[in-house]
Amino acid sequence: MSNIGKQPVEIPEGVDVIISGNNIHIKGGLGELNLKFDTLIKISKKDTKIIVERSSDEKKYREFHGLYRALIQNMVYGVSTGFSRELILVGVGYTVEKKGNFLLINAGYSHPIYFEIPKGINIEVPSATIIDIKGINKQNVGDVAAKIRQIRKPEPYKGKGIKYSDEYIRRKAGKTVGGVGA
């Protein structure tokens, strides 16, 4: 049995869970999320726990067992506390500014880049070099953070670029001047 799948999901106070057919609806203080799950998996609610079960030990059933339990856990956590990701801009002149529903990013190009903030995502800019991305859906928060980071990935020589706050950039030594030769 899946070690992740067999653990029940705790439902915190203030979170409502409605299971109907093969759809689960979770509503909390920050918002609400829906998940349509496969009929191979049985999801039930008992007291303050959500239990995910499978009916067979076939490979397909085992794969979905842990997956749906993890997705439901992320939904419960998202509507109760939410997810966040922090990006840091490293480099001379690399700045970010929030203008309405857009981020104005200066990342070393000849022109500024306008990034539209998607619905369901809240972006804060506490300083000119820090971007804080918040939302209730873990996948959407990570996707937006990856798209912003893609604008200018950190490079290994000087470490310039847009990086996650907990990311370590492995630095390379540059070329040495002089040396052996004619």
Image (cartoon, rainbow, N blue to C red):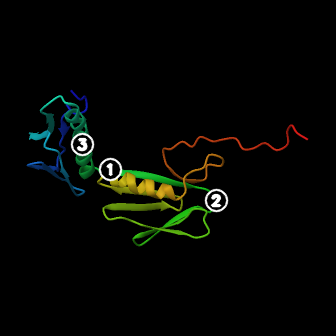
Of residue 72 and residue 47, the one placed in the foreground of this image is 72
> Image quarter for residue 116?
bottom left
Q: Residue furthest top?
A: 1
Q: Which residue is mark 1?
A: 138
Of residue 74 and residue 60, the one placed in the foreground of this image is: 60
Which residue sits at x=29%, y=53%?
137
Q: The N terminus is located in which quarter?
A: top left
Q: Residue at x 55, y 57 (%)?
A: 152
- Please indicate, yes or no, whether residue 107 appears anywhere in the rendered image: yes
On the picture, is 96 further left or further right than 134?
A: right
Between label 1 and label 2, give the one nearer the viewer: 1
Q: Amino acid at mark 3?
A: Gln
Residue under numbered circle 3: 73
Checking the image for residue 92, the label placed there is: 2
Q: Quadrant of the C terminus?
A: top right
Name which residue type carries label 1: Lys
Residue 101's spot in the image, x, y percent? 39, 71
Q: Element at badge 1?
A: helix
Name the side, left or right, on which 83 lies relative to 103: left
On screen, residue 179 versus residue 66, left or right, reads right
- Dot 2 lies on which element? loop
Q: Position of residue 48 (x, y in %)?
A: 13, 40
Q: Tell me, yes or no, whether the two marked residues, 2 and 3, touch with CB atoms within 8 Å.
A: no
Pointer 1 or 3: first along the chain: 3
Q: Quadrant of residue 31?
A: bottom left
Q: Which residue reaches farthest right?
A: 182
| Dot label at residue 38 | none
Residue 5 percent coordinates (x, y): 22, 33
